[in-house]
Image (cartoon, grey):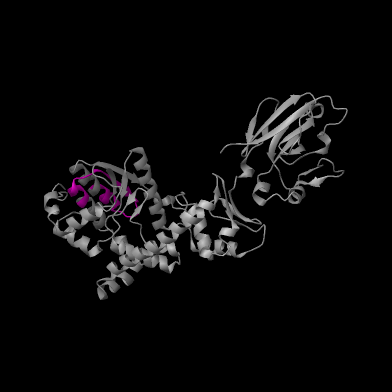
């Protein structure tokens, strides 16, 4: 094995591909000499070429990561080769083994592998305090990805192809073709292993590679260069649109951690796709900021619907509501999973973005308001008081009303928007609603001339 694992750095530095690689490496403005890099190495030609070039540059602190998917009988040999090379080069070697039996129904093998691969790489970056991740995606991968995205109608974002730099992930080989890397590996006698599943045409990407890109590249040798140039043009146009949105629109959006408000007057005359992109950019950088064609179409339909009160649930746990003058976005709390909290005198509690207090006092001249209510403590003091979210079917007798009313009807009459309605809290006394918090107390707990004890209910917004 020792003969197979030699990487001759001085010879590689003389190779015509090395100077181009160095240029690409330092085109990453944030990457500096001495940075630590986690290199994803499968044992295949591409990743072995990347590792050899990176080691030969001598500029970085390198860690090798290998993921053994156990999808082939000889996958352990892949792991052995990568481990041997890392040991020979005195480079830290990290490895994770996956179990194909754990692939969930409806998830492709490729997606399963990709998800676990990046989860593992990101975990290593954090646990080992590594600056960057590098993968060996090259020009052919770029062409395949672009064509796959076009066939799936992924929209403008899909025209970006494989990102050269996304977060901590760097891809320095995108301007190199598979053929160039293959010739380099052959010239330098760099060991690698062939994954025979790459020839399985039942896998869509393999079909695109062997039946579309290869024949096309044979007919048009400049194909990959042309696709890369087109992608760069697409990115320029996308960046221009995003700059306009981020500079002139997002600055006018009122935002907090769990809510945003888009004034309709700033977007009503704009094309639908500008509105869609505005919403997408509000979530830029989230862990789940990828949008499918279906999700984009649904968002376009939402903006086309002019009906006040119309709402749309996004895939990331947010909801959009069309109000009279605003598009309101709010991160939805899972109210059905929020347990009630008990309220006792002089012990403030927190419940869904609000702080609640109960203080017992003699009747005084305090002025009631929706968030500060005076109630008859002599009625409530022997009952268990709890704050919970309202449920469909809840009823109460609003202050001043002779009969009872459904909470849902009361909130509608009060013109409470959808988001506030879904997280509306109520105070119950032995299960009976005494206060629709922040809106109205029940008639049966009101102060009367005969009241001898007063309780002050206070609700205040939490700083979040």
Camera sees residue 205: no
Residue 462, given in percent of the width and then of the height, sits at 60, 36
Residue 410, given in percent of the width and then of the height, sits at 77, 48
Query: Does 125 appear in magenta?
Result: no
Q: Is residue 437 left or right of residue 379?
A: left
Of 202 and 335, the residue lying toward us: 335
**Please, is residue 324 above or below residue 333 in the view?**
below
Of 66 and 54, the residue lying toward us: 54
Residue farthest to the bottom, as pictured = 219
Residue 428, given in percent of the width and then of the height, sits at 74, 36
Residue positioned 68% across, 38% down in the render: 388
Query: Does 55 appear in magenta?
Result: yes
The quadrant where residue 359 appears? top right
Residue 57, given in percent of the width and then of the height, sits at 18, 48
**Please, is residue 191 above or below residue 60 in the view?**
below
Q: Is residue 258 left or right of residue 324?
A: left
Q: Is residue 132 left or right of residue 451?
A: left
Residue positioned 14% across, 53% down in the render: 12
Of 154 and 361, the residue lying toward us: 361
**Please, is residue 352 above or below residue 182 in the view?**
above
Q: Which residues are magenta?
A: 53-80
């Amino acid at each position: 094995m020792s003969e197979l694992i030699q990487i001759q750095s001085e010879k590689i530095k003389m190779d015509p591909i090395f100077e181009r690689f160095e240029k690409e490496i330092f085109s990453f403005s944030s990457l500096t000499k001495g940075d630590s890099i986690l290199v994803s190495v499968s044992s295949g030609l591409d990743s072995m070429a990347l590792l050899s070039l990176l080691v030969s540059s001598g500029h970085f602190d390198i860690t090798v990561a290998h993921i053994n998917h156990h999808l082939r009988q000889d996958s352990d040999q892949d792991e052995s080769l990568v481990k041997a090379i890392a040991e020979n080069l005195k480079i830290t070697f990290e490895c994770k083994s996956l179990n194909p039996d754990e692939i969930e129904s409806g998830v492709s093998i490729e997606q399963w592998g990709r998800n676990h691969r990046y989860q593992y790489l990101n975990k290593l970056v954090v646990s080992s305090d590594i600056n960057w991740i590098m993968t060996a995606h090259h020009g052919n991968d770029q062409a395949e990805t672009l064509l796959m995205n076009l066939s799936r109608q992924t929209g403008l974002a899909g025209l970006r192809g494989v990102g050269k730099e996304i977060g901590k992930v760097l891809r320095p080989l995108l301007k190199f073709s598979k053929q160039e890397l293959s010739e380099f590996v052959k010239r330098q006698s760099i060991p690698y292993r062939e994954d025979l599943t790459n020839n399985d045409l039942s896998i869509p990407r393999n079909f695109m590679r062997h039946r579309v890109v290869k024949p096309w590249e044979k007919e048009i040798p400049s194909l990959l260069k042309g696709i890369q140039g087109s992608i760069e043009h697409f990115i320029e146009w996308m960046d221009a649109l995003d700059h306009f949105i981020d500079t002139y629109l997002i600055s006018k959006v009122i935002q907090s951690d769990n809510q945003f408000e888009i004034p309709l007057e700033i977007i009503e005359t704009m094309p639908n796709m500008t509105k869609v992109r505005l919403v997408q950019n509000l979530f830029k950088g989230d862990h789940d900021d990828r949008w499918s064609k279906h999700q984009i179409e649904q968002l376009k339909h939402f903006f086309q619907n002019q009906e006040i009160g119309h709402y749309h649930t996004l895939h990331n746990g947010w909801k959009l509501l069309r109000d009279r003058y605003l598009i309101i976005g709010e991160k939805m709390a899972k109210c059905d999973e929020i347990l009630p909290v008990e309220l006792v005198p002089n012990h403030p509690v927190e419940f869904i973005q609000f702080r609640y207090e109960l203080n017992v006092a003699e009747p005084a001249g305090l002025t009631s308001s929706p968030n500060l209510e005076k109630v008859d403590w002599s009625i409530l003091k022997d009952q268990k008081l709890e704050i919970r979210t309202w449920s469909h079917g809840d009823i109460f007798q609003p202050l001043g009303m002779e009969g009872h009313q459904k909470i849902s009807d009361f909130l509608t009459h009060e013109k409470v928007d959808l988001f506030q309605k879904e997280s509306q809290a109520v105070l119950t006394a032995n299960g009976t609603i005494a206060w629709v918090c922040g809106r109205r107390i029940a008639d049966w707990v009101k102060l009367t001339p005969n009241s001898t004890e007063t309780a002050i209910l206070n609700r205040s917004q939490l700083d979040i």
